[in-house]
Amino acid sequence: MQGGSGTLHQERVNVEAPVRRFGLWTTTALVVASMIGTGVFIGTGMIIHDVPSAPGILSCWVLGGVAALCGALSYAELGVAMPLSGGEYNFLSRLYHPSVGFVSAWISLIVGFSAPLALIALAFGSYLEALVPIPPRVSAASLIIALSALNAWRVSMGARFHNVFTLAKVVFIAGFALVGALRINPAYLADAHKPLWATLLSPGFAVGLLSVSFAYTGWNAAAYVAGEVEQPQRVLPRALAYGTLLVTVLYVALNAVFLGAAPLDALSGQVAIADVAATRLFGSRGGVIVAAIVAIGLVSTANAVTMTGPRIYEAVGRDFSKFGWLAARTEAGGPRRAVALQAVVALGMMLAADPGQLLVYIGFTLSISAGLTVLGVYRLRRRGDIPASYRTPGYPITPAVFLALSAWMVLQGVIEQPLSALAGLLTIAIGLAIYRGSV
């Protein structure tokens, strides 16, 4: 495999290419399920301190959606030009250097998939406890193990399970937003501690946007399974765009209901803001309603993470003989050892998971990886040796918008929360050290 400025001096592991089984519906559902996770149910309550304005918070969610859509359209061009599974690992290895791709795969394992899977599973256990008296960590561990086994055993079963739960999630969230909109107090949506223009220009808004970016994580999910997508030149762009647009609409509508349910002071710092809002809107039954909706939704999200992440490690296994064991899969199953690796790391992270500390760390680190990938669209156009039948709409403005917002978020993240930024940089350094020990 050729990098932008170097060659991957590894003997490619001889494995059979996976079958292209994923159509438009499954691929779009993968994007939707990957995006709608814990972030939208905890993000707003945690950013009110930085963004003390209901209009400002809604602007944050809208702008986050714009950034995600610009990123998705840019990734679509890369995915069509290089239709192999692996996402950033595949793109960065070919456009820059194998070391850059390897580090992105390491980031994906720790920050992009295992950490979120741990958070998702813990949130699932917490919400399920309101319905069934099972300790949250037991439910969380059971969910990770069950979904990992399902996706390692048979890809088609994992896809069908995923489609059903994703549809249920979208229907429930849309229903909650519609019914909740009839009960909110519109005056709360104008609640603000400072003018909107001052909020949008404040450093706190950038930090809030960084946290919101975690909730939008997953807009690039289809790129990770590009090697298993039918007609990628047609399906990938549509799935990335349709999925991201749908989630943006749902996010803005859902947060409008949250913010319209109570004044900002009552919502500030609330991790379970969905539960607080539902109780205000629907009384004591509200908590049960939210618990059921979120629990079902988190199953879909956890399954999406379980499907996508291992494809990156599988790609590493194909390219690096020392990690060749990660590329093993059965004829009808997924990359079982890569799935197992992610499950083990996620189970370990469950013991130390803290949503408040992880949100900015995850958003900061993934913003660097995604930003470098979107920058690759310009590099792809200049090289001209990798043909693409799809071009990013609005180029060169579309990727530039994503890059500008990412740079702003990363810079403010370093200034406002240097420890989280340092943890992200340390993660990158460790990945580079592992790469050097592998060549």
Image (spheres, grey):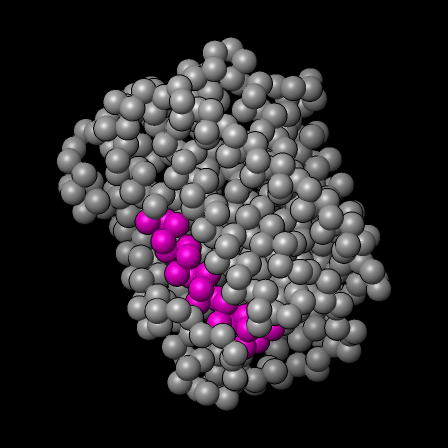
Q: Which residue is drawn at 67% across and 46% down?
A: 163
Residue 265 drawn at (x, y percent): 29, 21
- The quarter in which the C terminus is drawn is bottom right
Q: Which residue is drawn at 66% across and 40% down?
A: 165
Please, is residue 223 above or below residue 344 in the view? below
Please, is residue 10 above or below residue 398 in the view? below
Q: Is residue 57 left or right of residue 17?
A: left
Please, is residue 106 above or below residue 363 in the view? below
- State the predominant SS element of the stretch in magenta: helix
Q: Which residue is drawn at 79% across and 74% down?
A: 16
- The quarter in which the N terminus is drawn is bottom right
Q: In this view, does 204 lie to the left or right of 22?
A: left
Residue 136 drawn at (x, y percent): 64, 27
Residue 70 forms part of the magenta stretch: yes
Q: Residue at x 77, y 78 (%)?
A: 14
Q: Kindly tell me whether residue 83 is visible in this rendering.
A: yes
The quarter of the picture where residue 168 lies is top right
Q: In this view, does 252 lie to the left or right of 355?
A: left
Residue, far right: 331
Q: Kindly tell me whether residue 126 is visible in this rendering.
A: no
Number of numbered discs overlaid on the protein picture: 0
Residue 421 drawn at (x, y percent): 37, 52
Q: Residue 281 or 215: which is nearer the viewer?
A: 281
Residue, far top: 284
The quarter of the picture where residue 126 lies is top right
Q: Residue 161 or 436: which is nearer the viewer?
A: 161
Q: Residue 319 or 422: which is nearer the viewer?
A: 319
Q: Is residue 260 left or right of residue 370?
A: left
Residue 277 forms part of the magenta stretch: no
Residue 29 drawn at (x, y percent): 60, 50
Region in magenta: 63-83
